[in-house]
């Protein structure tokens, strides 16, 4: 009998440092210049992770930051070579602001089949509103130039766009940006941050309305852009039950781990630096100790505890209370964007019912 492969994702916070100063950044931008992962520490930590998982797992290593391209290309060269020699099958990806991309990186990522995720919030008028250099200059021009270089070299990439209080006001203009990148997978990430007890987030109702408008534009297309959120929701409605968006995983703590530059392990990069969420240190202890730690147990309790809060919600099996990083007053609460999801789910449900009435079955 074939045993189905399971995927576990290890997010590597390669550094806390970044060459940009985006207005909504959740990374610790105080920035100590020694906050980099070394290849030696990467090797030690990944060896332990590789030893821990059963052979039926495949492992995705996602290089994140801060800005991961602040590390030298040689780090990645050694990292890719090292991963190839381990027991498991590894997939790799890098999530970058792209401004520091050069030919060495392009060649390395291509040769090693490493997927590139670009942070881009729309065209220049949207992107430059938050995503700036230290001197206040927007980064769009540089990012766009590097995207053209990637396109010229035939390299595939994905885009992550933060939906913020600025671009949310212009859904029509924002959507036309997707159409310039029809072959690119898009992930939408609503802005959410709690800083000194102040919530910095888009309004859930406005987000719900924004997403339904985008959905209407999207579903009307002959060749719709690849917006993963909409595909996931449709797939869940029609019973395919596969979610690429971590927000709607049953329990993300089962399959996502984040490793910082000092070997500390957390459930997700949103918790890096928060000791209450640290599973332990992988340079000092085996990975089994992190997985079986009391902190991980505390995190994994969320699904069963929030289920009660979501009782009666017809969309529970699609949303599972949403993302624990988007919560106020602790992770045992529903996602702050609950209302937005309900608006979107309700809207997509109606749209699918309409298609079925018309006898259309091959939707998106
Ligand atoms: S590119 Fe990413 S890490 Fe850098 S400042 Fe912007 S949000 Fe923060
Ligand atoms: S906490 Fe939220 S962002 Fe982090 S892995 Fe879980 S669902 Fe994704
Ligand atoms: S939509 Fe809201 S109530 Fe329903 S499962 Fe998600 S967070 Fe819970």
Image: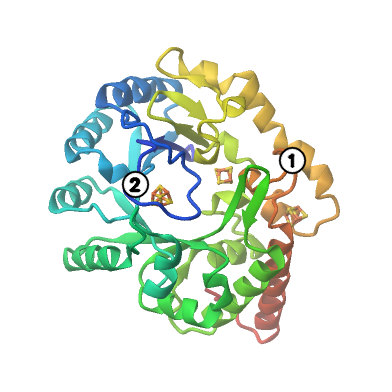
Name the residue rendered at 46%, 84% in the picture. Answer: 222
Is 218 situated above or below 75? below
Kindly identify the residue that appears in the image at 40 percent across and 79 percent down. 179
Q: Residue lying furthest bottom in this view? A: 358
| Residue 329 tag number | 1
In this view, which residue lies farthest toward the front?
Answer: 135
Can the viewer see residue 67 in this picture? Answer: yes
Alpha carbons under labels 2 and 1: distance apart: 32 Å
Q: Position of residue 25 (x, y in %)?
A: 48, 49
Q: How many marks?
A: 2
Nearer the observer, 364 or 277: 277
Q: Quadrant for residue 261, please give it.
A: top left
- Horizontal arrangement in the rendering, residue 136 relative to residue 205 (left or right): left
Task: Using the image, determine if residue 346 lies above or below residue 278.
Answer: below
Question: Does 29 sit above or below residue 96?
Answer: above
Q: Which residue is mark 2?
A: 93
Return the x and y of residue 176 as percentages of the image width and height: 44, 81
Residue drawn where x is 44% and y is 67% of the image: 129
The answer to which of 335 and 36 lies nearer the viewer is 36
Q: Earlier in the sequence, mark 2 or mark 1?
A: 2
- The answer to whether marks 2 and 1 mark residues whose Cβ atoms lie closer than 8 Å is no
Q: Is residue 193 left or right of residue 84?
A: right
User: Does any portion of residue 361 appear in the rendered image?
Assistant: no
Q: Position of residue 213 (x, y in %)?
A: 61, 78
The response on whether ligand 3 sits within 8 Å of label 1 is: no
Residue 364 percent coordinates (x, y)? 52, 73
Badge 2: few (under 14), some or many (20 or more) residues near its Cα, within 10 Å?
some
Q: Residues within 10 Å of mark 1 (few under 14, many from 20)?
A: few
The residue at the point 42 percent across, 30 percent down is 260
């Amino acid at each position: 009998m074939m045993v189905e492969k399971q995927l576990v994702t290890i997010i590597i916070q390669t550094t806390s440092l970044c060459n940009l100063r985006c207005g909504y950044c959740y990374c610790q931008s105080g920035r100590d210049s020694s906050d980099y992962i070394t290849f030696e520490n990467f090797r030690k930590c990944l060896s332990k992770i590789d030893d821990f998982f059963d052979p039926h797992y495949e492992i995705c290593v996602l290089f994140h930051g801060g800005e991961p391209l602040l590390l030298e290309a040689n780090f990645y060269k050694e990292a890719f070579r090292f991963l190839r020699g381990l027991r498991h099958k590894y997939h790799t990806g890098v999530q970058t602001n792209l401004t520091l991309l050069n030919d060495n990186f392009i060649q390395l990522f291509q040769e090693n089949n490493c997927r590139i995720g670009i942070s881009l919030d729309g065209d220049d008028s949207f992107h430059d509103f938050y995503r700036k250099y230290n001197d206040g200059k927007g980064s769009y021009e540089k990012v766009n130039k590097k995207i053209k270089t990637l396109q010229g070299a035939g390299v595939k990439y994905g885009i992550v766009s933060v939906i913020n209080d600025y671009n949310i006001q212009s859904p029509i203009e924002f959507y036309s940006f997707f159409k310039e990148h029809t072959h690119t997978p898009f992930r939408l990430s609503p802005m959410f941050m709690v800083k000194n007890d102040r919530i910095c987030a888009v309004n859930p109702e406005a987000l719900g309305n924004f997403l339904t408008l985008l959905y209407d534009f999207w579903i009307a297309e002959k060749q719709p852009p690849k917006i993963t959120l909409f595909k996931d929701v449709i797939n869940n409605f029609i019973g395919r039950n596969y979610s690429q968006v971590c927000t709607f995983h049953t329990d993300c703590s089962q399959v996502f781990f984040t490793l910082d530059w000092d070997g500390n392990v957390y459930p997700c990069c949103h918790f890096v630096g928060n000791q209450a969420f640290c599973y332990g240190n992988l340079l000092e202890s085996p990975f089994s100790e992190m997985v079986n730690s009391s902190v991980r147990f505390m995190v994994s309790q969320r699904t069963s505890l929030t289920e009660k809060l979501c009782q009666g919600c017809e969309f529970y099996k699609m949303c599972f209370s949403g993302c624990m990083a988007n919560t106020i007053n602790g992770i045992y609460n529903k996602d702050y964007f609950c209302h937005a999801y309900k608006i979107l789910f309700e809207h997509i449900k109606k749209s699918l019912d309409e298609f079925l009435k018309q006898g259309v079955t091959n939707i998106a």
